Amino acid sequence: GQQVMQIPQYQHVQEGEDFTTYCNSSTTLSNIQWYKQRPGGHPVFLIQLVKSGEVKKQKRLTFQFGEAKKNSSLHITATQTTDVGTYFCAGWDYGQNFVFGPGTRLSVLP
Amino acid sequence: ETGVTQTPRHLVMGMTNKKSLKCEQHLGHNAMYWYKQSAKKPLELMFVYSLEERVENNSVPSRFSPECPNSSHLFLHLHTLQPEDSALYLCASSQEGGLGYEQYFGPGTRLTVT
């Protein structure tokens, strides 16, 4: 079945440093979504990517969908303490299966 | 955010108890989902309802029984649970069921099975 992996599992950064998490799927995805879950909170939708090679930006966040539509990345520039949380990717494959990755937990040291 | 509400927020139950989790969405969505989130596992999709019909059941044990009486309400009935069922149970909704629609999550019910 479809598997979605994320690396790294944990990331500790100093405030102001950049951060990147990578999402890799075992199968080709029709689209991919990114969610953020703050400690003690619930996942909140960030963005959806659909097209091969697509790049979208939200302020300091840059999302990219790979050319083969099997991987994606989220890059945060100049992290802030408000960026703390777990970032999940979730992908739809063409078999209509929807699977979340295990997430990358980001901590930001002030 | 009050788009998706869940009750109770915390639940402690014994293995012989029967309880129900409730989810309500106020977003006018047509699809609702139950997820299980354990400490060291990815979010696991348990059930999907689209227009009140169950469209997905990911090999969930029969001790979990979902019910969707209308497009705004979703229940998860629990009976004879095991300690390994302790987890955060999240409800979500989306405009339609299927690919391409973002999901809105509720705050979750933290379940502890003793």
Image (tube, helix red, strand yellow):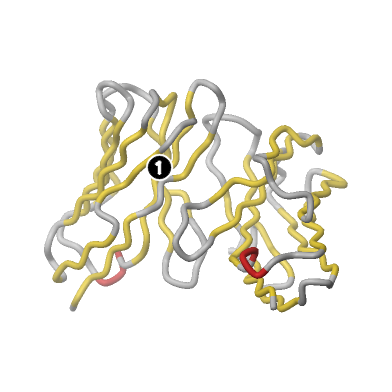
Q: Position of residue A23 (x, y in %)?
A: 31, 41
**On the image, which quarter does residue B101 sit in?**
top right
Q: Please indicate whether residue A110 sits to the left or right of residue B104 in the image.
A: left
Q: Please indicate whether residue B78 sits to the left or right of residue A78 in the image.
A: right
User: Which residue sits at x=20%, y=63%?
Assistant: A79
User: Which residue sits at x=21%, y=53%?
Assistant: A76
**On the image, which quarter does residue B14 sit in?**
bottom right
Q: Please indicate whether residue A31 sits to the left or right of residue B113 in the image.
A: left
Q: Please indicate whether residue A91 sits to the left or right of residue B90 in the image.
A: left
The secondary element bearing badge 1 is classed as: strand
**Relative to A99, is B13 above or below?**
below
**Relative to A57, is B83 above or below?**
below
Q: Position of residue A42 (x, y in %)?
A: 52, 62
Sort mark 1 into few (<14), some (14-19) or many (20+) by Cα contacts within 10 Å.
Answer: some
Camera-nearest residue between A6 and B25: A6
- The residue tagged 1 is A47
Q: Position of residue A33 (x, y in %)?
A: 42, 40
For the residue marked with disc 1, what is the amino acid?
Ile
**Relative to B65, is A98 above or below?**
above
User: Which residue sits at x=81%, y=38%?
Assistant: B52
Q: Position of residue B75 (x, y in %)?
A: 79, 55
User: Callout 1: residue from which chain?
Assistant: A
User: Which residue sits at x=66%, y=71%?
Assistant: B111
Number of numbered labels in the structure image: 1
The quadrant of the picture occupied by the C terminus of chain A is: bottom left
